[in-house]
Image: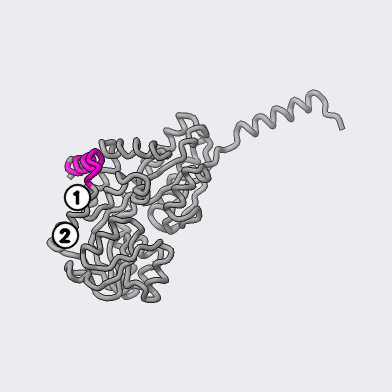
C-alpha cells in the first residue's frame, strides 16, 4: 500500500523525533557488593542524573564485578567495552605508581584528612588527572572504600607482635604485600573472589578489608576476630573512556561530574553511621571486634616507614600528595 505524501511526512517526522529523543546510555561498573555504600551512592547518582530531561542520560550500573574485577573493569573502560569503571585506586598503580601512594600504610593521619584530599581540587588530584590521560583514561571524580581493617581466626591484633605467624590474604598490590610482611604476618596475594573459600578452608588465616566489604561480602562469616588497625585508606577513582565525551555535550559532561561530586558527599553521610552498624552486625553473630590503641598504630606506622620511602621515588607525585595532606590536617 502506498503512503500518501502527508502520511509519509508524518512517518519521517515521527522517526526523526523518536531518534532525537533516545536516551544516551552510559555503563558504570565496580567490584563492590550491591548493598555496599559505594553502590548506594551510585544509585543516588543514577536517580539524580536520569531526572535531567535536557541531557536524557540512562545510567546502567554493573556492581559486584559483573564486568570483571577491578583491573579487568579498568581494561574494559580503556577498550570502550564500558564507559566508566570505579576501581580501588591502587589498581591503577599497575600503569602509574602515582596512583599507589594513597594506599601506602598509614599515609593519612585520619579519615577527615583523606576525604579532604579527594574532595577538593589540589596539586595531587590535578596530577592524577594528567597521569590518567597519559594511560588513556579520564578521571571524573573520586569515591571511597574506607579504611582497611584486619579479620583473622588466630587472635585479636592488639599490638604489632600479634601479626606473627598469621597468614593474611591481601590485595594483589605490591605495597600491601610488603606491609604485612613488614609487620610480621605472611602476605598471600589473591583476588577478593577467592578469599572467602581460602579462609574457610584454612589456606589463609584471614584478610584485610574495609568493614563494609567484610559485611557485604560475608567475610564476617569465616573470621573470629576483627581488629580496627586503620592501616590503609582506600579511595576509588572514577575513570572513563575518553570517547565518553563524544557521546555527551559539554553541558552534559559537566552534569555527569557534578552528580558524581554530589554522590561523593552523599556517600560520606552514609559512612558516618554505617561503620557502627557494621560492627554491630559482626558482633551480633559472635565476631570479636577490637580497637587498636593509637600508640600501637604509631609503632606500625614507624615499622612501615621503609615502604613509604620506597614509593617516594616519584618525587613530583609524592611531594604533591604529602603537601596536600599537610595542608588538610
Residue 173, image x, y percentages: 33, 56
Main SS of the magenta segment? Answer: helix
Q: Secondary structure at mark 1?
A: helix
Quick one: which residue is furthest to the top in this view?
5
Q: How many numbered marks are there? A: 2
Left or right, 306 with respect to 38, comes to left
| Residue 38 tag number | none
Residue 219, image x, y percentages: 37, 68
Marks 2 and 1 sit apart, C-alpha to C-alpha, by 12 Å
Name which residue lies at 22% across and 46% down.
312
**In the rendered image, is residue 258 in sight?**
no
Categorize mark 2 by other alpha carbons within 10 Å: few (<14), some (14-19), many (20+): some
Left or right, 109 with respect to 93, comes to left
**In the rendered image, is residue 251 in sight?**
yes
The residue segment tinted magenta is 312-326
| Residue 303 tag number | 2
Question: Is 201 above or below relative to 216?
Answer: below
Q: Secondary structure at mark 2?
A: helix
Residue 242, image x, y percentages: 46, 36
Query: Which residue is label 1 attached to?
Result: 309
Colour scheme used in the picture? one colour
Q: Please identify the quadrant where the C terminus is shown.
A: top left
Q: Residue 123: name its quadrant.
A: top left
279 within the magenta span: no
Question: Is 319 above or below relative to 287?
Answer: above
313 within the magenta span: yes
Name which residue lies at 42% across and 66% down.
194
Q: Toward the viewer: 203 or 46?
A: 203
Residue 107, image x, y percentages: 22, 51
Amino acid at each position: 500500500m502506498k503512503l500518501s505524501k502527508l502520511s509519509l511526512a508524518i512517518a519521517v517526522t515521527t522517526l526523526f523525533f523518536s531518534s532525537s529523543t533516545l536516551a544516551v546510555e552510559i555503563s558504570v561498573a565496580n567490584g563492590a557488593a550491591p548493598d555496599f555504600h559505594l553502590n548506594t551512592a551510585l544509585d543516588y547518582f543514577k536517580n539524580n542524573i536520569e531526572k535531567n530531561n535536557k541531557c536524557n542520560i540512562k545510567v546502567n550500573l554493573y556492581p559486584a564485578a559483573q564486568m570483571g574485577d577491578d583491573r579487568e573493569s579498568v581494561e574494559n573502560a580503556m577498550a570502550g567495552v564500558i564507559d566508566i569503571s570505579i576501581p580501588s585506586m591502587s589498581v591503577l598503580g599497575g600503569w602509574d605508581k602515582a596512583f599507589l601512594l594513597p594506599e601506602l600504610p598509614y599515609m593519612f593521619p585520619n579519615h577527615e584528612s583523606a576525604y579532604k584530599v579527594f574532595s577538593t581540587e589540589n596539586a595531587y588530584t590535578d596530577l592524577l588527572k594528567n597521569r590518567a590521560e597519559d594511560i588513556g583514561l579520564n578521571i571524573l571524580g573520586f569515591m571511597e572504600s574506607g579504611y582497611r581493617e584486619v579479620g583473622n581466626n588466630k587472635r585479636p591484633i592488639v599490638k604489632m607482635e600479634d601479626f606473627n605467624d598469621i597468614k593474611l590474604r591481601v590485595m594483589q598490590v605490591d605495597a600491601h604485600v610488603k606491609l604485612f610482611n613488614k609487620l610480621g604476618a605472611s602476605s598471600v596475594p589473591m583476588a577478593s573472589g577467592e578469599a572467602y573459600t581460602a579462609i574457610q578452608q584454612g589456606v589463609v588465616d584471614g584478610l584485610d578489608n574495609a568493614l563494609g566489604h567484610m559485611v557485604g561480602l560475608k567475610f564476617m562469616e569465616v573470621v573470629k576476630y576483627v581488629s580496627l588497625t586503620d592501616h590503609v585508606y582506600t579511595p576509588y577513582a572514577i575513570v572513563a573512556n575518553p570517547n565518553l565525551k563524544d557521546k555527551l555535550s559539554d553541558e552534559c559532561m559537566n552534569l555527569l561530574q557534578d552528580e558524581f561530586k554530589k554522590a561523593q558527599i552523599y556517600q560520606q553521610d552514609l559512612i558516618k553511621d554505617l561503620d557502627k552498624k557494621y560492627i554491630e552486625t559482626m558482633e551480633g553473630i559472635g565476631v570479636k571486634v577490637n580497637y587498636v590503641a593509637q600508640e600501637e598504630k604509631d609503632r606500625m606506622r614507624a615499622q612501615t616507614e621503609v615502604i613509604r620511602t620506597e614509593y617516594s621515588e616519584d618525587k613530583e607525585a609524592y611531594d604533591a600528595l604529602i603537601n596536600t595532606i599537610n595542608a588538610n590536617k
